[in-house]
Image (tube, rainbow, N blue to C red):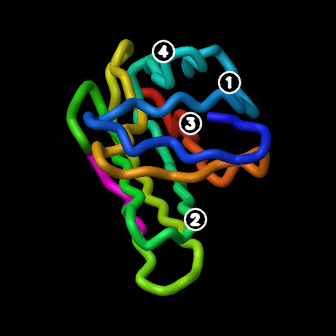
């Protein structure tokens, strides 16, 4: 996810995997910047965090979920009823098997705003192997 002057992602008619193209660190290349999917390289406990941002327009909610192998695990939602921008975040620690996938899904009919300031982020790291 990266745009020059800023843009909205969504709303889409179906839940859509977000692709974060601004990758700061990707040790081991477990995150695929073409698909937006993190694939666990080893069995272990991982921690993930997602942060979203929405410019106020009064007409859309911003809602995303952290997804593990197709199942929504936690959700971040934002909707401002006043004339101000809003943000939300959520995180989880989860045990993964090697090959499990984690990614962020933007819910259908929702949207987020981003620009070169990178308001929307997805991060994760291995806490320990098991």
**Circle on res. 41:** 4
Label 2 vs 3, first from the N-terminus:
2
Q: Which residues are magenta?
A: 73-78
Label 4 vs 3, first from the N-terminus:
4
Q: Distance of mark 4 from mark 3, alpha carbons?
A: 11 Å
Residue carrying label 1: 26
Q: Residue at x 63, y 15 (%)?
A: 29
Label 1 vs 4, first from the N-terminus:
1
Residue carrying label 2: 55
Viewer-closest of 99 and 9:
9
Q: Distance of mark 2 from mark 1, alpha carbons?
A: 29 Å
Label 4 vs 2, first from the N-terminus:
4
Q: Position of residue 63 (x, y in %)?
A: 37, 55
User: Closer to the camera: disc 1 or disc 3?
Assistant: 1
Q: Position of residue 22 (x, y in %)?
A: 71, 32
Viewer-closest of 42 and 79:
79
Q: Is residue 55 visible?
A: yes
**Circle on res. 83:** none
> Residue 103 falls in which quadrant of the image?
top left
Residue 42 horizontal side relative to residue 115, left or right: left
In the rendered image, the vertical position of residue 101 relative to residue 10, given as above or below = above
Residue most toward the left?
71
**Circle on res. 125:** 3
């Amino acid at each position: 996810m990266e745009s020059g002057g800023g843009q909205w992602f969504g709303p889409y008619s179906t839940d859509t995997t977000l692709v974060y193209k601004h990758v700061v660190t990707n040790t081991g290349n477990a995150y695929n910047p073409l698909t937006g999917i993190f694939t666990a390289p080893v069995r272990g406990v991982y921690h993930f965090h997602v942060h979203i941002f929405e410019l106020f327009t009064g007409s859309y909610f911003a809602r995303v979920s952290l997804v593990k192998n197709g199942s929504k695990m936690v959700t971040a939602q934002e909707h401002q009823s006043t004339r101000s921008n809003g943000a939300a975040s959520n995180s989880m620690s989860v045990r993964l098997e090697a090959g499990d996938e984690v990614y962020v899904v933007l819910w259908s009919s929702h949207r987020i705003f981003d620009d070169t300031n990178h308001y929307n982020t997805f991060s994760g790291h291995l806490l320990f192997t098991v």
